[in-house]
Image (spheres, rainbow, N blue to C red):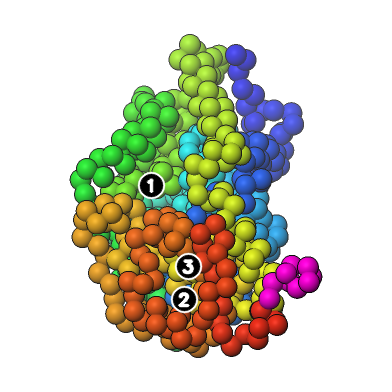
């Protein structure tokens, strides 16, 4: 294998200021190639459908956590809205933004950590390859962790050496970026203590104008600024209580909900162990970081980024593969010095093995993910045609014009494909606490563990929403058993059952999904357009 050209001396990148632009262009090409599947599969993960529905409600003028609730922080929905502004109003547009903007800019941050020198380029490519070489359901979807890593990775760049770590403007900038990352996904806050401690150490070593003990205070205060601004924005609109309720209180309740040790162990073996195997070369390279020519403080920072990212994977012991996404950037940074040594000035046998492994796992997962989504296997419920079929039936109904809909079940993809305004804030039923359903806790769903406590006040909110917004359609997924919702039939919930009986009529069933329509809709207008045309 020939040595990689050093961008510092490459004629194509002789101008120092132009080098990042060339690198970004290369990273965009690599990202587009490795994430091609996201350009053709509309819904890679159920969470994406929930996120885009939340962004649509926000763009319609609704207030997050009052008119639409979930346990995700607000900048995630802003991210989805911005993505659609650039690439169109669809999840394909969000995927395109992620693959062509977010991921390449994150790779550029990995390169910038090393001032775009050779090892930075290697680190950026390492991030792009390994971050696409796993279960596409989680690493190719536009999950919150991927959006979170964009500001978080540049926060690392801002304090990438001892001089910057001991400079209060750099530390403050790092804090603001991490605060923005927290508003995209809370796990970004886990890096704050580690970086704050290193800032204090760097400040003590350099004895700058700002006392070392003040630097952790600076980064904490700076990180709080985006949070305070966000709270003030919601406060001005009367939504601050609901913001705190859903993003803090309800989120803590969800994360701390007990999961059986057997189920946690099964998930650990199914997801965490394969992830560790796939990324094993990066863990090995990070372990050899002490042998590199990086300074002691730089090495400490690089290892801190890895170590403080690990606890996020253990939150709730659910081990969703997308929980591992925030490890890719720290691992790529920590592995870059050792990887450079394996290829420069010439490739070693170990380097060739690592490169072969990286390409093998990338190719393997690219093929496997394509088969899982496009091979007709229906492993993932997201590709079930029932979502499109029900949506087509709703849009063909004579009452579709100006209609609203409510889905009884954990299936936001119905909202996405039907593209009708939500009739209740509970578009993400997994977070509703209306039924006892606990997301990611299958033992609870099967009745083998304690269910999530039902909150009576939430039922008041639901029934008030349905009446106030005059829900036109109610889609019942329980008969179809979508995402195990057959365990929560409407008949078990008298308030909703009686409300449907009084105000709605069953008009159709599509692949066992029942469709109810409000009785006040006139008989002539309510006939599907396709049926009226056939008469």
What mark, if any, has residue 425 been given in the picture?
2
Q: Which residue in the protein does label 1 denote?
A: 320
Q: CA separation, marks 2 and 3?
A: 16 Å
Contact between marks 1 and 2 (CB within 8 A): the answer is no
Which stretch is magenta? 527-535
Q: Secondary structure at mark 1?
A: loop
Say if the magenta span includes residue 416: no
Judge left or right: residue 75 versus residue 317.
right
Q: Nearer the viewer, residue 441 or 18?
A: 441
Q: Nearer the viewer, residue 391 or 252?
A: 391
Q: Earlier in the sequence, mark 1 or mark 2?
A: 1
Q: Quadrant of the N terminus?
A: top right
Any part of residue 524 in sight = yes
Q: CA distance from mark 1 to mark 2?
A: 25 Å
Looking at the rendered structure, the secondary structure element under dot 2 is loop
The residue where tag 3 is placed is 476
Magenta: main secondary structure equals: helix
Q: Looking at the image, is 472 positioned above or below residue 144?
A: below
| Disc on the earlier residue, 2 or 3 | 2
Disc 1 packing (10 Å; few <14; some 14–19; many ≥20): some
Residue at image coords 64%, 31%: 8
- Tell me which residue sits at (71%, 34%) in the image: 13
Give x and y (percent) for residue 298: 39, 39
Mark 1 → mark 3, Cα distance in angstroms = 27 Å
Q: Quadrant of the C terminus?
A: bottom right
């Amino acid at each position: 294998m020939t040595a990689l050209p050093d961008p510092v001396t490459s004629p194509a990148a002789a101008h120092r200021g132009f080098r990042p632009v060339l690198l970004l262009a290369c990273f965009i090409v690599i990202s587009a190639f490795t994430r091609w599947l996201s350009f053709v599969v509309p819904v890679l993960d159920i969470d994406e459908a929930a996120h885009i529905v939340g962004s649509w409600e926000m763009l319609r003028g609704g207030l997050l956590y009052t008119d639409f609730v979930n346990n995700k922080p607000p900048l995630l929905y802003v991210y989805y809205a911005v993505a659609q502004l650039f690439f169109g109003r669809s999840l394909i547009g969000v995927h395109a933004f992620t693959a062509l903007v977010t991921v390449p800019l994150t790779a550029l941050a990995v390169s910038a950590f090393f001032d775009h020198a050779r090892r930075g380029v290697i680190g950026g490519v390492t991030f792009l390859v390994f971050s696409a070489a796993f279960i596409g359901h989680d690493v190719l979807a536009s999950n919150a962790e991927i959006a979170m890593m964009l500001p978080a990775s540049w926060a690392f760049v801002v304090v990438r050496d001892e001089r910057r770590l001991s400079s209060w403007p750099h530390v403050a900038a790092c804090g603001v970026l991490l605060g923005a990352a927290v508003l995209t996904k809370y796990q970004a806050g886990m890096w704050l203590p580690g970086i704050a401690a290193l800032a204090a150490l760097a400040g003590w070593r350099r004895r700058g104008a700002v006392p070392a003990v003040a630097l952790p205070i600076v980064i904490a205060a700076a990180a709080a600024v985006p949070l305070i601004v966000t709270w003030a924005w919601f406060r001005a609109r009367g939504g601050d209580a609901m913001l705190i309720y859903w993003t803090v209180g309800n989120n803590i309740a969800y994360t701390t909900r007990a999961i059986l040790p057997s189920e946690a162990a099964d998930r650990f073996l199914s997801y965490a162990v394969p992830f560790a195997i796939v990324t094993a070369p990066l863990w090995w390279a990070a372990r050899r970081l002490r042998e590199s020519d990086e300074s002691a403080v730089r090495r400490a920072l690089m290892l801190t980024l890895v170590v403080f990212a690990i606890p996020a994977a253990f939150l709730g012991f659910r081990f969703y593969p997308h929980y591992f996404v925030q490890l890719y950037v720290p691992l790529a940074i920590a592995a870059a010095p050792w990887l450079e040594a394996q290829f420069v000035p010439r490739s070693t046998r170990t380097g060739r093995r690592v490169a072969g492994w990286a390409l093998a796992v990338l190719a393997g997962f690219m093929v496997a993910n394509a088969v899982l989504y496009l091979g007709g296997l229906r492993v993932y419920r997201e590709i079930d045609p029932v979502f499109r079929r029900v949506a087509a039936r709703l849009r063909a109904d004579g009452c579709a014009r100006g209609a609203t809909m409510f889905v009884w079940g954990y299936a936001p993809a119905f909202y996405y494909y039907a593209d009708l305004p939500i009739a209740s804030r509970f578009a993400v039923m997994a977070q509703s606490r209306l039924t006892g359903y606990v997301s990611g806790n299958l033992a609870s769903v099967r009745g083998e563990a304690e269910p999530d406590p039902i909150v009576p006040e939430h039922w008041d909110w639901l029934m008030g929403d349905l009446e106030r917004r005059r829900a036109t359609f109610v889609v019942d997924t329980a008969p179809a058993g979508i995402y195990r919702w057959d365990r929560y039939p409407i008949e078990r919930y008298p308030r909703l059952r009686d409300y449907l009986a009084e105000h709605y009529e069953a008009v159709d069933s599509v692949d066992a999904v029942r469709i109810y329509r409000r009785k006040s809709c006139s008989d002539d207008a309510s006939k599907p357009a396709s049926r009226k045309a056939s008469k």
